[in-house]
Every structure is written in structure tokens, then in C-alpha cells.
Amino acid sequence: GQNIDQPTEMTATEGAIVQINCTYQTSGFNGLFWYQQHAGEAPTFLSYNVLDGLEEKGRFSSFLSRSKGYSYLLLKELQMKDSASYLCAVRGASGGSYIPTFGRGTSLIVHP
Amino acid sequence: EPEVTQTPSHQVTQMGQEVILRCVPISNHLYFYWYRQILGQKVEFLVSFYNNEISEKSEIFDDQFSVERPDGSNFTLKIRSTKLEDSAMYFCASVDGTSDTEAFFGQGTRLTVV
């Protein structure tokens, strides 16, 4: 089975930097995803890590340590529109199909 | 930009009725998925579909549920004899199967069972 843990809620100030952590335990590992989900909307893809290290994409970066079962999503220069739920999803060893297991999500509130 | 489309956006049904949720995945994608999200809870995997058959399903996907790809473009989720606890947002997703990375999600169908 898979167990994914992330904080329930975080708050931050506009313009600041925030780091959202995710720890996981899986039977096998085949990639970790971060998705953003605004209330009532579909998750949208942010990042994918399969090897250790940092992946940077604009204001968003994602880090993975497979040995520690740990990832974080770093959001820089926060904007009000970044207020959303951030979902960590891990794909275990499930053959050729893509079936990530989602964490409960971290609700990020950005205030002025 | 290609997108996954789902209809209807909102469905209200009486307990015990059957509902069909429809999805049109991105045309060249090979893997299709249904997820659900009960209000305030996490996104949960229901079923994956590849090569015109179910490839994996979760314990949630019991005999009450079925999926079909009737005409090569639509991908449907049927829920027989709906229960109050089936009320949730149902998301369809597709993956191209070649780049093997991100899933593209539809905007979801909000199912309310009364």
C-alpha cells in the first residue's frame, strides 16, 4: 500500500516563499507529482520528479529524496492566486499504467 | 490546447437511480482513469482503462460501478443504484502513455444524490 502525508493547512504572505512538504511510504516508487487544485476545480499538473534533486519551473520548484521518502514544493514570490490546495501524488510500482495515489492535500492561504 | 471534457458538470439524482457520467479524453491518449473526490477529502482512484479493458481498479470500484468506451471517443462511468455516499466530484483523466508523465484531468462532474 501507499501512505502519503502532508500538512493540512499553511498560510503565507503575498510575495513570500513557502515550502510544502510531503512524506511517503510506498511499495516501489515510480514518480512523484505535485498538482494544484482550486476549490471546485480539477487538479492541474505542476511538477514531476522521478530522480533525486530539484526541478525548477518558474516560481515553482519541486525536490525529491527517494531514500528519505520525502519531497517538497517550493513556491516563490507568492501571489494571491496561489491560494489553493496542493496535492502530492505518488506512483508506486504498478507496471505500465499511471495510477498515482494522492495525499489529502495542503490548503495554502495567501494573505496580503 | 487539447483538453479532457466531462458532462454534465452537475448531476442531481435520487437515491437508487442509475447515473452515467461522460468523458471525452484527449484524442491520442491511451490510458483513461476515473477518480472521485468527496467534499473536503482527498482525490481517490477508482479505475483505470487501457486497450478497451479495465487494467486496475480500487476497492471502491465494486459491482455498483462500470466503465465503457462505447465509440472510441467517449469514456463513461455508470453508477447503478446510487447511494447518498456516492455524492462527490468525479474526475476523468487521461495520459498519453508515451511520455508517461502527467495526467490531464477534466473539470469534473459534481454528483449529488438526494
Image: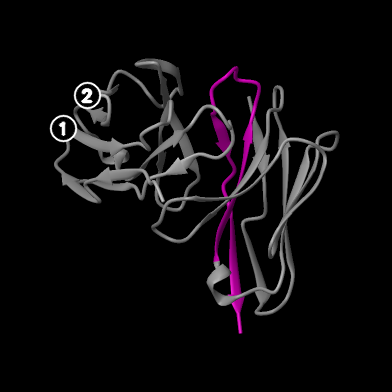
Measured as percent of width and height from the top left, residue A59 is found at: 69, 65
Q: Which of marks 1 and 2 is in front?
A: 2
Which quarter of the figure has residue A20?
bottom right
Q: Local crowd at mark 1 within 10 Å, few (<14), some, or many (≥20)? A: some
Q: Which mark is residue B16?
A: 1
Given the image, what chain letter belongs to the residue carrying mark 1?
B
Above or below, comparing residue A23 to residue B56 in the picture: below
Q: Name the residue under label 2.
A: B71
Q: Residue at x 57, y 33 (%)?
A: A100
> Most extreme residue toward the right, as rendered?
A67
> Most extreme residue toward the bottom, as rendered?
A112
Q: What stretch is highlighted in magenta?
A: A84-112
Horizontal arrangement in the rendering, residue A49 relative to residue B96 (left or right): right
Rendered-image quadrant of the C terminus of chain A: bottom right
Given the image, what chain letter belongs to the residue carrying mark 2?
B
Measured as percent of width and height from the top left, residue A7 is found at: 67, 55
* Towards the viewer: B58 or B107: B107
Horizontal arrangement in the rendering, residue B91 relative to residue B97 (left or right): left
- Measured Cα–Cα span from mark 1 to mark 2: 27 Å
Q: What residue type is labelled 1?
A: Gly
Above or below, comparing residue B27 to residue B2 in the picture: above
Q: Which mark is residue A109?
A: none
**Residue A27 appears in the picture as rendered:** yes
Instruction: Tell how many labels.
Output: 2
Measured as percent of width and height from the top left, residue A1 is found at: 63, 24
Q: Residue at x 56, y 47 (%)?
A: A104
Q: Residue at x 48, y 48 (%)?
A: B41
Measured as percent of width and height from the top left, residue B12 is found at: 18, 48
